[in-house]
Image (cartoon, rainbow, N blue to C red):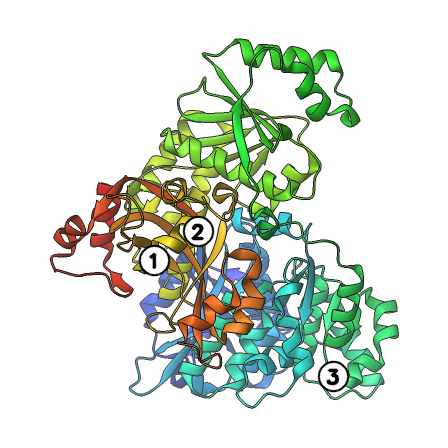
């Protein structure tokens, strides 16, 4: 009969405290020295959990602290009497800690020496390896481990929305390593990275991948590199329930079928199932052999990479985002006037959603008539062929409201919807309003899909709201501004409080801190966190390319105009030689348009815009062209020219988005004064946070 172990919290008066201290002293070599007074202090705070056996003796304890500033719990000691080790006592102690902390704190962290070889133990408890840091003992390393309580936040909610529009698949950890192994010949795995799959397919890893990286690589720099790769290039899935009920079922199945995989592999698969992913991609033949049985038990398909690609190709619909198709189209935006109601009614009334002609007409007449409150525009192509209709409500100084946003169903509808949403945000920010709110109760599906894919709006009472603060401040100042808005504007704006807290969040890992600030700048675009230490580069660009990628002023001065409708583009790619940036970096770009006498004086040789740097990829011209041809105006021969006609040489692709055109062009002389050096901006270079702040202040 299994002995019953009782788990309790103790205080400083507990008769078990002395046994806890003695057990800690006995294991001082691994736990480290903790004074008796410290034990007493933790007991006073009821931060010692003990395991009591049937003889009412203490056979183990867990001592923890609460880090309020980080909103998390940290385990200091987890110690089990030698005779009770391996009997599940540690799991019970930890389970109790999870139970009493999961509602209030974000998670549980701990630090453990790598040479204690406890990685498997922490992984089994559900911890995920995060990063290495130096130990107090010379030449030793500590590993930091994290157990997440999976509280929802703005970023996780955005991911949930985005899951509605892409097929999320979990890939086997071995496939991940195959992607980046230097001698890898797994072409089936490599084909999963093909760009044509991106609109339909989201490749995911479970957070167990970090435990595998921790075990797989002995070198700390390799661990860091592959950890960053996983976070940067894949969606990381976590189990949405603390219960691990499927682990034993999976383990039983693989043991019955004599499949040789590790417990870490089983945890990996189990986390994929519990994250509500319905496809698991692997080239493990033993797992593929039990695909039918696995599906029956867990409702998850096990698929070979090659078969997945074939299936996606068969069901793949026409790509929605099609900037290439807009090449040469002449779209115009015109103010709606009295007498155009019938035209608008014909193309933009939501009759399928029950909107009557009378209701629609009354709305339009009101919007057109009350010119002090509303501005009405429609977008058309060619001979007045309507494509979109939008109304701006400017009654509130702090907010631009969109009471009506409609699009005609055409081949470029998703792109038009993307343009309308981003342009609304841009207008709101340009007018120094803090928010954009879309309140049309009969939004077309294309617009709703774009809002969800955008991921920066919050939904409240059937409206969509986001912040767009046209300011550049420190994280602390921005946090205070958001807190004031949250307090003064009511429940609908509670999300400002959440972002404010994120700005105050202390992240020990520098890379994660940069990622957090990068995401916050996306959420608050065009706001800039000037003390974020977010990498910023000045990048020169020829006027010929700038006119097509973001510069409408240049396009309007070009005899043939722009090759594409510039305002419709939000995400683009720029190519250059491979020097200057490393793959995996994120940050900001300040665009310097190089001198070109083909354009009017003052439109070149100036700082023009600022973008978010989303990704840097280095590869052969042909591969990059195939990968990004829908995000730029370049021909393959343009890319080969960058290599000086050596097509097998690598070049760099810079994927950027959310470009803010500056109000004031900064001349080269002004830039030199800020940088305090006579640069000619022949190549890209990094600038300091202070230099960025000065450039941004003078340009906006």
Q: Are marks 1 and 2 in contact (CB under 8 Å)?
A: yes
| Residue 138 coordinates in the image, percent (x, y) | 29, 86
The relative height of residue 289 versus residue 49 in the rendered view (above or below) is below
Q: How many marks?
A: 3
Image-quadrant location for residue 367: top right
Find numbered disc 1 in the image and state the secondary structure of the residue it sits on: strand
State the residue position of label 3: 284
| Marks 3 and 1, how far apart at CA | 47 Å
The relative height of residue 677 versus residue 360 in the rendered view (above or below) is below
Q: Is residue 460 left or right of residue 531?
A: right
* Residue 617 seen anywhere in this rendered image of the structure: no
Q: Nearer the viewer, mark 2 or mark 3?
A: 2
State the residue position of label 1: 541
| Marks 1 and 2, how far apart at CA | 10 Å
Find numbered disc 2 in the image and state the secondary structure of the residue it sits on: helix
The relative height of residue 566 versus residue 583 in the rendered view (above or below) is above
Q: Quadrant of the N terminus?
A: bottom right
| Marks 2 and 3, how far apart at CA | 44 Å
If you read the primary sequence from the N terminus, does the residue marked by circle 2 or circle 3 appear first? 3
- Give the residue displayed 34% in from the left and 57% down from the top: 542
Q: Is residue 489 left or right of residue 163?
A: left
How crowded is the residue under tag 3: few (<14 C-alpha within 10 Å), some, or many (20+)?
some
- Nearest the viewer among 635 and 656 is 635
Q: Quadrant of the C terminus?
A: top left
If you read the primary sequence from the N terminus, does the residue marked by circle 1 or circle 2 appear first? 1
| Residue 197 coordinates in the image, percent (x, y) | 67, 64
Image-quadrant location for residue 85: bottom right
| Residue 589 coordinates in the image, percent (x, y) | 35, 56
How crowded is the residue under tag 2: few (<14 C-alpha within 10 Å), some, or many (20+)?
many
- Nearest the viewer among 657 and 63 is 657
State the residue position of label 2: 549
């Amino acid at each position: 009969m299994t002995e019953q172990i009782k788990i309790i919290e103790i205080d400083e008066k507990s008769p078990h405290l002395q046994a806890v201290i003695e057990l800690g002293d006995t294991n001082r070599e691994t736990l480290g020295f903790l004074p008796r007074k410290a034990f007493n202090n933790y007991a006073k705070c009821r931060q010692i959990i003990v395991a009591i056996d049937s003889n009412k003796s203490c056979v183990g304890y867990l001592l923890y602290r609460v880090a309020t500033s980080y909103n998390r719990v940290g385990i200091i000691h987890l110690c089990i009497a030698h005779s009770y080790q391996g009997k599940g006592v540690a799991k019970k102690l930890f389970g109790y800690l999870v139970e009493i902390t999961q509602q209030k704190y974000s998670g549980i962290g701990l630090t453990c020496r790598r040479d204690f070889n406890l990685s498997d133990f922490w992984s089994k408890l559900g911890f995920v390896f995060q990063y290495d840091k130096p130990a107090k003992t010379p030449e030793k390393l500590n590993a930091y481990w994290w157990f997440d309580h999976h509280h929802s936040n703005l970023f996780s909610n955005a991911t949930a929305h985005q899951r509605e529009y892409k097929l999320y698949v979990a890939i086997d950890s071995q496939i991940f390593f195959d992607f980046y192994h230097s001698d890898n010949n797994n072409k089936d795995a490599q084909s999963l990275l093909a760009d044509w799959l991106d609109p339909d397919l989201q490749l995911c890893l479970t957070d167990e991948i970090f435990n595998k990286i921790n075990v797989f690589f002995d070198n700390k720099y390799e661990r860091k590199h592959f950890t960053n790769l996983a976070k940067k290039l894949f969606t990381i899935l976590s189990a949405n329930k603390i219960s691990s009920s499927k682990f034993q079922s999976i383990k039983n199945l693989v043991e019955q079928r004599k499949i040789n995989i590790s417990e870490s592999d089983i945890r990996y698969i189990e986390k994929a199932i519990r994250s509500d992913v319905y496809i698991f991609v692997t080239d493990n033949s033993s797992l593929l052999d039990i695909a039918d049985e696995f599906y029956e038990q867990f409702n998850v398909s096990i698929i070979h990479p090659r078969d997945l690609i074939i299936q996606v190709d068969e069901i793949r619909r026409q790509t929605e985002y099609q900037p290439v198709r807009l090449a040469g189209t002449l779209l115009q935006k015109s103010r709606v006037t009295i007498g155009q109601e019938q035209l608008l009614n014909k193309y933009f009334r939501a009759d399928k959603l029950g909107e009557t002609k009378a209701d629609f007409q009354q709305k339009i007449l009101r919007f057109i008539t009350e010119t002090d409150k509303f501005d009405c525009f429609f977008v058309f192509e060619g001979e007045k062929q309507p494509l979109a209709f939008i109304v701006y409500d400017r009654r509130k100084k702090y907010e631009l409201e969109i009471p009506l946003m409609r699009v005609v169903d055409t081949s470029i509808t998703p792109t038009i919807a993307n343009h309308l949403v981003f342009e609304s945000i841009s207008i709101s920010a340009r007018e120094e309003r803090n928010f954009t709110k879309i309140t049309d109760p009969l939004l077309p599906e294309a617009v709703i899909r774009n809002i969800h894919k955008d991921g920066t709006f919050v939904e409240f009472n059937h409206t969509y709201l986001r912040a767009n603060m046209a300011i550049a401040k420190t994280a602390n100042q921005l946090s205070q501004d958001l807190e004031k808005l949250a307090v003064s504007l009511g429940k609908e704006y509670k999300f400002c409080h959440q972002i404010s807290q994120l700005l105050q969040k202390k992240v020990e890992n520098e890379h994660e801190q940069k990622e957090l600030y990068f995401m916050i700048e996306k959420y608050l675009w065009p706001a800039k966190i000037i003390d974020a230490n977010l990498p910023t580069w000045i990048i020169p660009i020829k006027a010929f390319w700038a006119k097509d990628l973001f510069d409408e002023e240049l396009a309007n001065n070009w005899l043939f105009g722009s090759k594409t409708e510039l305002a419709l583009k939000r995400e683009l790619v720029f190519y250059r030689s491979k020097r200057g940036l490393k793959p995996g970096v994120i940050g900001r770009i300040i665009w310097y348009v190089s001198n070109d006498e083909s354009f009017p004086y003052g439109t070149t040789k100036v700082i023009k815009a600022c973008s978010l740097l989303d990704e840097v990829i280095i590869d052969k011209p042909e591969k990059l062209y195939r990968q990004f041809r829908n995000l730029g105006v370049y021909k393959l021969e343009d890319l080969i020219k960058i290599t000086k006609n050596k097509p097998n040489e690598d070049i760099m692709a810079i994927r950027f988005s959310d470009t803010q055109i500056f109000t004031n062009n900064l001349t080269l002389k002004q830039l030199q004064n800020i940088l305090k050096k006579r640069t000619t901006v022949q190549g890209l270079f990094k600038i300091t946070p202070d230099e960025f702040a000065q450039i941004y202040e003078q340009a906006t």
